[in-house]
Image: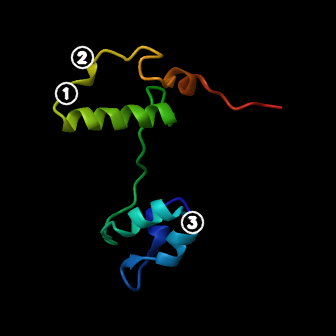
């Protein structure tokens, strides 16, 4: 499944609840099933990617931070980065992580 339309029941014009629940975690399925369905919308690719055009957890995190700051009326560009150790969590280790290859 790669399209939202794959998770819709076109005869009822709503989510295919069983498929959504079988595909996603309970938490995600619950959130998806709460979303309003519009079967008339055309599917289009949508993701948040980095400057090279790749999707990553880091690029998704940056989008989430940007949205949060926009909602709070703050400018991310002017924000000072938190130094490692100040928050107690080493975000830099997540951004540097690469899967082990054998």
Location of residue 15 (image quadrant)? bottom left
Q: Secondary structure at mark 3?
A: helix
Q: Secondary structure at mark 2?
A: helix
Q: Residue at x 53, y 59 (%)?
A: 2
Q: Residue at x 50, y 36 (%)?
A: 57
Between disc 3 and disc 1, whose residue precedes? 3
First along the sequence among labels 2 and 3: 3
Question: Which image quadrant is residue 69 in?
Answer: top left
Residue at 50% across, 65% down? 26
Q: Left or right: 43 with respect to 19?
A: left
Of residue 36 and residue 95, the one placed in the foreground of this image is: 95
Answer yes or no: do the residues labelled 1 and 2 have beta carbons within 8 Å?
A: yes
Which of the two discs, 3 and 1, sits closer to the camera? Answer: 1
User: Where residue 92 appears, x then y in whole percent?
Assistant: 52, 21
Q: State if disc 3 and disc 2 touch (CB < 8 Å).
A: no
**Dot 1: element:** loop
Q: Which is more toward the observer, 52 or 73?
A: 73
**Where does label 3 land, which residue?**
23
Which residue bears the numbered disc 2? Answer: 78
Between the C-alphas of marks 1 and 2, the distance is 8 Å
Q: Which residue in the protein does label 1 denote?
A: 74
Residue at 19% x, 27% y is 74
> How many numbered marks does the figure carry?
3
**Quadrant of the drawing holding the C terminus:** top right
Quadrant position of the N terminus in the picture: bottom right
């Amino acid at each position: 499944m790669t399209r939202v339309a794959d998770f819709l029941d076109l005869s009822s014009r709503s989510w295919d609840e069983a498929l959504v629940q079988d595909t996603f975690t309970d938490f995600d399925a619950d959130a998806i099933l709460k979303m309003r369905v519009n079967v008339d919308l055309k599917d289009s690719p949508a993701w948040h990617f980095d400057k090279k055009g790749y999707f990553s957890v880091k690029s998704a995190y940056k989008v989430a931070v940007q949205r949060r700051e926009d909602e709070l009326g703050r400018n991310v560009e002017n924000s000072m980065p938190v130094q490692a150790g100040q928050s107690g969590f080493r975000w830099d280790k997540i951004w540097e992580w690469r899967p082990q290859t054998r």
